[in-house]
């Protein structure tokens, strides 16, 4: 394959981001620890009419599943959201809000902030930290306001909203606690325990060579006799009203699909939503992986399992996208060399794949975000999650370039690096190579990291239980970090020929894992979220294994900084850790996984934590970012045929969520 220099790749990315770029304001709103951004969709105008129409239909299918995630995140979320929205839109409340906005103070202002937070988190628990956030207005005021506005509500929501002891965690990973009973997520019915759920999954697990993902699309419940049974997500079953609307738009998408492979994948998804049959889901995954020619692509359905405390049931998510053809050259180079990366990793040969199949990688432009991808979203995706499909048919890996661009635009000149990086030398290095390294880190993580290695015969995909997500993200990150320091990337034209270039990402990742990600944690809290645990696990394990002062935390004028003295030494330790994490994964060593997570990934230094929070507060930044979507509008002729699809970026955050609740509210309050 022809080599493309990093300069050329960077220029292609720049050109791609500039084409048809509207003059949009990236930052839309800021409240609590959250900032709302817009994202540009460069190249949409250049798509064919068929492709634009496909994007529109798939976007409508994505938005129709919105209520599903709210309900999965907590059985009271829909009732709470709808009550808040009814009160918010009442004449009584709007008059009160208008009065209080002049001073920026008052209960009505606080309710607006709380509602915006509920929208962002798709429920009443923090989208990343899992802790319940409490209203800053009182229960008494809320009850009186509802009465004055003529808004009825279910009294059961009051303790759920206002009592800190009721459903305090969306997903708990606390050692020694019943993870099912201790989690507010609605993946299990009332009274189902962790032991009962695990016993049911063990009894029903599929041990064939092409296993069904038992539990992916169902809620485990307990009947009057105490027996456990499934409520399957399907039309006619749980979430059926929403899935019926999803299928309506998928049927329309089927009519404008780009090719037979894409039609086959969409047809299997329609069947899966109709029946809930996991065989249809496997067929969809295989067909979706095989579809490599379509410009427009999508994720739609029950996908990631991070929020289920047992890591089995998928949350609803969707992302509609299309390929950035020029920027994809970078990921195609990585994908074409997947076998080389596998062969040269530090893992034991017995855990390596003899033949890496079908690692399809591309850079995409996100066109619509929904479910667990909205408002907060990943910047890279690698699917499907079933190991046997990945092994036999391959996987798709994507880097979402226009979202990365939006983050970068919003971060310009915010003072973060000046405050937390140890000296000018590393700041200059990160400014020079940070964007290149960040993109390559995501590419390697998604393209080859997740697809690397293999399970040993007889090892079940669920062997690591509640720690599976943390260990898997750790494995992919380590794979990416190790090879970012390899000269192979220079040979492939992906990294500049500067031996220090990879230092930028090593410093950023270790600083984040040890120190700066703590700004996302409330004082006194442990780390719960899988990706945050992964980052601290890597940085803390590496730090603990620095026997020759390769890396240290220094103090200067009362502030602590990370200092890396030997980057090659740190890379060797990263390689050692990669070998161990792959062993744990391949052997399904639950005891070792648990020990690693509990030793390195959960607890934080309270004094360092307080320092990070104080220094970050001085910058007046929001540690979490999310997005508003563009609005697509079909243009039709007299016969009702679509002749064009327009895109608009002007809808505000509040306006968008109120519209979504009006147009895509498909589920009853109680499930």
Image: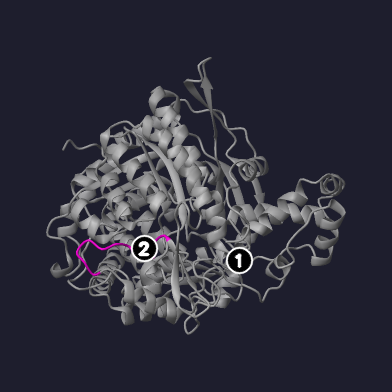
Which one is closest to the eye, mark 1 or mark 2?
2
Is residue 436 at least partly visible in the picture?
A: no
| The quarter of the displayed image where residue 353 is located | bottom left
User: Crowding at label 1, few (<14), some or many (≥20) Cα neighbours within 10 Å?
Assistant: some
**Magenta span dominant secondary structure:** loop
Does 27 lie within the magenta span? no
- Residue to which mark 2 is pinned: 473
Q: Report the residue that reaches farthest toward the front.
A: 225
Residue at x 35%, y 69% (from the top left corner): 471
Residue 599: horizontal and vertical position, in percent? 41, 80
Residue 275: horizontal and vertical position, in percent? 39, 53
368 sits to left or right of 124 = left
| The quarter of the displayed image where residue 160 is located | bottom right
Give the camera-side residue of 386 and 597: 386
Residue 285: horizontal and vertical position, in percent? 30, 50
Give the camera-side residue of 565 and 514: 514
8 sits to left or right of 112 = left
Residue at x 44%, y 51% (from the top left corner): 378
Q: Report the residue that reaches farthest toward the bottom.
A: 176
Is residue 248 at least partly visible in the picture?
A: yes
Residue at x 65%, y 74% (from the top left corner): 166
Q: What's the distance in space between the residues labelled 1 and 2, CA to CA?
A: 25 Å
The magenta span reads 207-217
Quadrant (top left, top right, bottom left, bottom right) of the C terminus: bottom right
Check disc 1 and report its element: helix, strand or loop.
Answer: helix
- Residue to which mark 1 is pinned: 613
Give the camera-side residue of 640 and 615: 640
Does 210 lie within the magenta span? yes
Check disc 2 and report its element: helix, strand or loop.
Answer: helix
The figure's colour scheme reads one colour
Residue 116: horizontal and vertical position, in percent? 67, 52
Number of numbered labels in the structure image: 2
């Amino acid at each position: 394959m022809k080599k493309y220099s990093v300069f050329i790749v960077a220029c292609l990315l720049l050109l791609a981001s500039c084409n048809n770029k509207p003059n949009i304001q990236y930052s839309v709103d800021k409240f609590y620890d959250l900032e709302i951004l817009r994202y540009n969709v460069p190249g949409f105008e250049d798509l064919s009419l068929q492709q634009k129409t496909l994007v529109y239909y798939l976007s409508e299918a994505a938005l129709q599943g919105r209520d599903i995630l709210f309900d999965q995140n907590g059985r009271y979320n829909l009732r709470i959201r709808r009550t808040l929205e009814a009160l918010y839109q009442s004449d009584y409340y709007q008059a009160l809000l208008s009065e209080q906005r002049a001073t920026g103070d008052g209960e009505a202002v606080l309710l607006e902030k709380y509602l915006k937070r509920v929208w962002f988190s798709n429920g009443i628990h923090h989208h990343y930290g899992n802790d319940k956030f409490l209203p800053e207005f009182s229960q008494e005021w809320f009850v009186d306001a509802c009465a004055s506005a003529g808004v009825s509500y279910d009294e059961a929501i009051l303790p759920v909203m206002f009592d800190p002891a009721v459903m305090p965690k969306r997903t708990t990973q606390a050692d020694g606690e019943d993870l099912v009973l201790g989690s507010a997520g609605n993946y299990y019915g009332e009274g189902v325990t962790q032991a009962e759920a695990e016993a049911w999954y063990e009894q029903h697990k599929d041990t064939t060579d092409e296993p069904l993902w038992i539990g992916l699309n169902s809620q485990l419940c307990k009947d009057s006799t105490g027996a456990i049974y499934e409520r399957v997500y399907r039309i006619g079953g749980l979430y059926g009203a929403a899935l019926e609307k999803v299928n309506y738009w998928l049927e329309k998408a089927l009519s404008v699909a780009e090719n037979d492979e894409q039609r086959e994948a969409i047809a299997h998804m329609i069947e899966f939503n109709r029946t809930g049959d996991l065989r249809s889901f496997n067929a969809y995954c295989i067909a979706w992986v095989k579809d490599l020619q379509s410009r427009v692509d999508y994720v739609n359905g029950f996908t990631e399992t991070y929020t289920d405390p047992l890591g089995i049931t998928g949350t609803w998510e969707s992302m509609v996208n299309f390929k950035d053809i020029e920027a994809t050259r970078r990921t195609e180079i990585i994908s074409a060399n997947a076998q080389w990366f596998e062969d040269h990793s530090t893992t034991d040969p017995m855990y390596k794949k003899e033949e890496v199949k079908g690692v399809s990688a591309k850079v995409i432009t996100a066109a619509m975000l929904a479910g667990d991808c909205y408002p907060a979203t990943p910047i890279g995706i690698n699917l499907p999650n079933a190991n046997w499909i990945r092994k036999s048919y391959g996987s798709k890996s994507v880097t979402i370039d226009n979202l990365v661009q939006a983050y970068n635009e919003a971060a310009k000149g915010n003072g973060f690096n000046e405050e937390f990086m140890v000296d000018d030398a590393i700041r200059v290095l990160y400014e020079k190579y940070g964007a290149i390294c960040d993109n390559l880190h995501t590419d390697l993580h998604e393209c080859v990291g997740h697809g690397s290695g293999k399970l040993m015969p007889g090892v079940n995909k669920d062997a690591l239980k509640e720690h599976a997500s943390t260990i898997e993200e750790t494995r992919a990150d380590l794979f990416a970090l190790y090879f970012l320091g390899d000269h192979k990337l220079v040979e492939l034209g992906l990294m500049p020929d500067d031996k220090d270039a990879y230092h930028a990402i090593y410093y950023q990742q270790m600083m984040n894992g040890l120190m700066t990600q703590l700004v996302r944690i409330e004082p006194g809290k442990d780390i719960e979220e899988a990706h945050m645990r992964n980052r601290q696990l890597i940085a803390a394990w590496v730090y603990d294994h620095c026997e020759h002062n390769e890396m240290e935390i220094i103090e200067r004028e009362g502030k602590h900084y990370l200092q890396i003295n030997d980057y090659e030494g740190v890379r060797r330790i990263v390689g050692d850790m990669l070998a161990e994490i792959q062993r744990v994964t391949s052997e399904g060593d639950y005891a070792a996984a648990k020990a690693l997570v509990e030793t390195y990934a959960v607890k934080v230094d309270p004094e360092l934590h307080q320092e990070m929070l104080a220094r970050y507060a001085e910058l007046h930044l929001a540690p979490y970012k999310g997005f508003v979507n563009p609005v697509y509008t079909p243009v039709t002729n007299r016969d009702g045929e679509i002749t064009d699809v327009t895109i608009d970026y002007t809808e505000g955050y509040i306006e968008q969520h109120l519209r979504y609740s009006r147009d895509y509210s498909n589920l009853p309050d109680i499930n």
